Image (cartoon, rainbow, N blue to C red):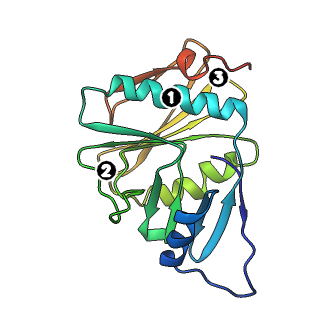
Amino acid sequence: MRVSRKVKHTVNSFVSPEDYLALERKNEFKSEYLDGEIRAMTGASRPHNIITLNVASELRAQLRAANCETYAMDMRVKIPARNQYTYPDVIVVCGKPELEDDYLDTLLNPTLLIEVLSKSTAKHDRTVKFDHYRTLESLAEYVLIAQDEHRVEQYTRQADGRWLLTDAGGPEGVVELSAVNCALPLGVIYERVEL
């Protein structure tokens, strides 16, 4: 995830989801939304961009013949239970994508969400954001990728609703994504990234 900062509004101002979407669709920069507050997103680092594109490209290639779509960085996800809109780094949806409206820019049913961690977002992505993402019934896997070492954390929803954490590390490691039937070698994830 890229760092976000709160957008200044007048004191005690509340922005409705409808107003947020109207603003977001005409702004030149992206912002996330949480329960009436808008947070502007900052740009991502070079390693963050390389990792995001490596992962999205690999998933798209592996899923080309599947009934799945891969999005990188610009598809918004709505989290109704938290009155939130967010931009995960990589999204995969399998089956028919459910979109909020005719603008076709807000996904409701992601299967897999991936965030690339930074020092400023790692704690938030592991705790608050994961807590929010878990409320999405369609979500089967959540993956966190470190920028500064060969390390990937994978959370997989179990049949009883619990989440199982699996770590992969080292340049020879592989992340097996059972929800989308793909494998992500860490060598591919970190290709061209200097660690």
Q: Secondary structure at mark 3?
A: loop
Classify mark 2: residues with Cα within 10 Å, few (<14), some (14-19) or many (20+). few
Marks 1 and 3 in Cβ contact (< 8 Å):
no
Query: From where the camera sits, is residue 176 visible?
Result: no
Residue shown at 23% from the left, 36% from the top = 67
**What is the spatial separation of the Cα atoms under label 1 and label 3, in whole angstroms?**
14 Å
Query: Disc number at residue 55?
Result: 1
Marks 2 and 1 in Cβ contact (< 8 Å):
no
> Label 1 is placed on what type of residue?
Val
Q: Which residue is mark 3?
A: 150
Residue shown at 49% from the left, 69% from the top = 82
Quarter placement of the C terminus: top right
Query: Disc number at residue 160?
Result: 2
**What is the spatial separation of the Cα atoms under label 2 and label 1, in whole angstroms?**
29 Å
Give the image location of residue 44, x and y in percent. Answer: 69, 41
> In the image, which is nearer the foreground, mark 1 or mark 3?
1
Drawn side of residue 94 relative to residue 148, left or right: left
